[in-house]
Structure formats: C-alpha cells, structure tokens
Image (spheres, rainbow, N blue to C red):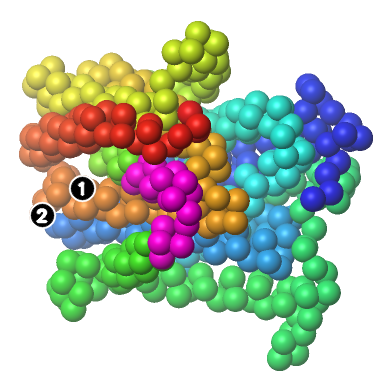
Amino acid sequence: MATQANNEATMLGHPKGLFYLFFAELWERFSFYGMRALLTLYMVNEIFEALAIRDMAAAAVYASYGSLVYASTVIGGRVSDTLLGFRKSILLGGILMALGHFVLAIEYNIAFYLALGLIVVGNGFFKPNISTFVAALYQENDPRKDSGFVIFYMGINIGGFLAPLLCGWLGASYGWHYGFGLAGVGMLTGLAFFWQGIKAGVFAQEGLPPSQERLNKKVMGLSNDHWISVLAFLSAPVIAFMLSSYEAIAGGNTFFGDQNLVNLLFKGIGVAVALYLGYILFQATVEERKKLIVAIFITVFMTLFWGFHELSGSVITLFADRNVDLSLINASQTNALNSMFIIILSIPISLLFTYLSKKKLNPRTPYKFGIGLLLAGVSFYILKLSGTAANEDNLVPFAYLIIMYFLISIGELFMSPVGLSKITDLSPKRIVAFMMGIWFLSSSYAFQLVGFIGKQLAVESSDKQVDNADSLTIYIEGFELISMYAIGAGVIVLIMAPFLNKLMGDVH
Ligand code: GLN
C-alpha cells in the first residue's frame, strides 16, 4: 500500500495525520460517551417513566443499542474496504452520528429510537475506519505504530473522561436535551478536525476509495456512492423499529416471549458465526488451527470482560444514582471514572510490560486475560462490600465506586489493547480482517450479557421513585454473584493458560 510515512511532515515524531485523527476520535468519543452517560437515566426517568418495569425496559434497550452499535462496525468496515474508503466512511458516519445526537436533543420521545438508529449506523461507518486509518499512516513494520495507538487510545479516553462530566452536568442542571445537544456539538467538532486534516493534506493519498470507478458506477440511475448514503440513512428507521420492539413487550404483548428482535437476531448471527468459524478451523493447517483456537478463546474471554465492564452505563449508573453517597458529582458523571483511570494508568502499565519483557517476566497473553477477569471479579466484590458501609439513607461511600473503577480499568489495560494486537498475530493474514470483525462482535455480544444481567437486577416499582432500600438489596446481591462469576471465569482462564500458551507457539 502506498504510504506517506517516509516523506511526510511529523509532529512529536509521528505522522501529522495522527493528530487530526486523534482530535476527531476524541470528539467522536466525547459524543458517544456523553450520550451513554445520560442514556439509562434518561430512559428510566423519562421514556419509561410510567412503567413499573422501567428498569427492565431500559436494560433491554441499552443492551440492544450497545449490541447493534458494535455490530454495525463489521458492516461499516467492509463497505469502507470494498467501496467507500476511510475518508468518505468517516465523514458519512460522523454526519449520521451528529444528526442522531441532535435528534435526541429534540424534546419528543418519538424521536428517541430514530436517534439511536442514526447513532448505530453512524458509529458503524466511523469507529472501525478511523482506527484502521491510524494504522494506514504507518508502514507495516514501523516501530512507532504501537505508540501511535497508545496516543490514539488517550484521545478516546480524554473524550470518554470529559463528556460524562460536561454532558452529565448540563443534563442535570438544564435538562437532558442540553446534554444530548452538547454531544452533537462534540461530534461536529470531531468532523471539523477531520475535515481540516483533509484540507491540510496530511493524509496524502491514504483513505481514498479503493476504486473511484466502481464507486461512481451507476446502479438504477444512482451511483454506488449515493446508494451507500441513501441505504445508510434508510437503515436508521429499520434499526429504530428493532430497538422499539421492547416497548410492545413492556406494554403486555409477549409475542417474542421476553426476547426482542435484536436478541433473536444475535442468536441467529451467533449460530452463523460459530458454523463459519468451524469451517475456517477445518480448512486451516494444523499450525494455523492451533493459533486460531487461542484467538477464539481470547475473544470469548474478552466478551465476558466487556459484559461486566459495560454494566457501567446501565446497572452501575443506576446504583450510583440510587445508592451512592455522591456530593461533588452526579450519577451520570461517575461514568468519567473509567476513562480517567485509563488515562492515568495506560502509560505506566505499558512501561511495566516493557520492563517485564526485558527481564523476561512479561506474563503471556492468557495469563494477562486471567488476571484481567480476576480484577473485574474483585472490582465487583468491592461493590458488594460497599453494602456493609451503607448509611441510614441506604447510601454507600463514593470511595467504593472509585476503587471499583480503578481495579476494572487495570483489568481493561491487561486485556483490551493486548488482545487487539494478539488477534493480528494469531490469525492467518488472509482472514485477519474477518477476525477483527469477530473481535468487534465480542463487544456486541457483551451487551447481550449486559442486557441479561440488567434485567435480573431491575428494580420494579409502581411509584415514580424507586425505594432505595429495595434497590440496595438487589444490587448488592447481584454484585456478589457477578464477582463470583468473574472470579470463576478468571480462575478457569488461569487453569487453561498453560494449554493455551502451548497452542500459541511463538506468539507471546
Ligand atoms: N473504550 C474503548 C472505546 O471506546 C473500547 C470499547 C469497546 O471495545 N467495547 O473505543
């Protein structure tokens, strides 16, 4: 692939384009996490306010939205690779997302699902392509690439840190819709940075459509280019319909049992993916097969971890709202803690791994994954312990929540960035993009788990105000169970580790 890496202008030793992508992604994540910080509380207190089972409905919609927002990246990545190229995909995705946030800012509930649909499609075009765009700025074996990704990850988390603080403050002080509106402004700012980068020519020839001719080709009077935009916009209402199918159940229609359309869709996709993976394993050589088995296992472990981690936007936010003694910040703002710890810890932890490598003591990937899951388990155990320190108003000290986020963020750094690079090492070149798609799907399935747990920990109440003694009991029991499952999973991974290490061969 043509690259500009050798003759381009640099900034802090990195291609200048990295810094435009850094700020574009910072603001995109600002919009994504700003909205996420408000979403569950908005559903519980506004959209589903009249329902006794409002927690359950909110858990179902949050889970379906989260599953689709990550699954759409598989399609967005594919469309970009084959037709659109990174630049157009990122612009299209950004516009759809900004629109979604502004639709959320409209004070009519009817707009709610459509907004989520727009964000799902927009994220599908934006998120995978901006990450791959970073990689494309470097030549294949450029040693700066890893640190380029560390810088990029910082951008993600600066957005993830600032957004809940600002959108959460606006939401609480002026109204939900101002918070969502600010998320939209954030996304537009991201787009402006990206556009500036294009204007400044920092991407040279990167990110253009693979074949302009194919993109311009007319099908039924419309070019492929235009078809993609039309279909992207049209799929938003379809997704809105799928997301809203929970409302029918909440209203007493049990046509789908306690499943909604999205749950059913993901069951189908799961079977298809499992069959296809079986086929790939069958076709692979013995050496490839061994590594692929490890890749599949670490993806499953990652799914479990995100399943516990992504509870932060639903159950943990509700817990913070109802049962944590908060004085300086409000419940949605507690969502900033994870990103804050990632910003503080990512450099020390990557230095720790480098130091351990030099001493030949760096644990191999399966051990890191076992430790990550154990940390998730311990973090939920801390929340369980918080119950013993509750005051007469059923509020627990904030310090417990801070320690919980500290521990789970270390776990995240032991797994997420490590896994990302190992997937590329463990997959044969011809299917590495497909395996990346599977890696992103792990976040989708994690949200199915989040939905399941969220429904178990839903507090029913015929009053508008949930009784916080009830909620404390439900959450503390739930946290104990989650911690046991996560610790159990961590122990199983550690027991399996020697076997997986053998299968990994020369990959560390
Ligand atoms: N926090 C990271 C991001 O927003 C990873 C999220 C995930 O993959 N589930 O990019």
Q: Residue furthest right?
A: 7
Of circles 2 and 1, the one toward us is 1
The residue under the point 45% across, 17% down is 362
Q: Residue furthest bottom?
A: 220
- Give the Cα separation between the discs numbered 2 and 1: 21 Å
Q: Residue furthest top?
A: 359
Callout 2: few (<14), some (14-19), or many (20+) C-alpha neighbours within 10 Å?
A: few
Taking the image as drawn, is residue 302 in sight? Answer: no
Which residues are drawn in magenta? 279-300
Which residue is the site of mark 2? 462
Query: Where is residue 153 shown, x and y percent of the image?
Result: 58, 32
Where 42 falls versus 474 (above or below)?
below
Question: Would you say 395 lies left or right of 5 here?
Answer: left
371 or 104, which is in the foreground? Answer: 371
Query: Where is residue 14 shown, x and y percent of the image?
Result: 77, 28
Taking the image as drawn, is residue 388 in sight? Answer: yes
Quick one: SS at disc 2? loop
- Dot label at residue 61: none
Q: Amino acid at mark 2?
A: Ser
Q: Amino acid at mark 1?
A: Ile
40 or 180, which is in the foreground? Answer: 40
Where 212 falls versus 456 (above or below)?
below
The residue under the point 24% across, 73% down is 248
Which residue is the site of mark 1? 453
Question: Would you say 251 lies left or right of 25 here?
Answer: left
The residue under the point 80% across, 33% down is 15
**Dominant secondary structure of the magenta stretch?**
helix
Callout 1: few (<14), some (14-19), or many (20+) C-alpha neighbours within 10 Å?
A: many
Quick one: SS at disc 1? helix
Does residue 496 show up magenta in the picture?
no
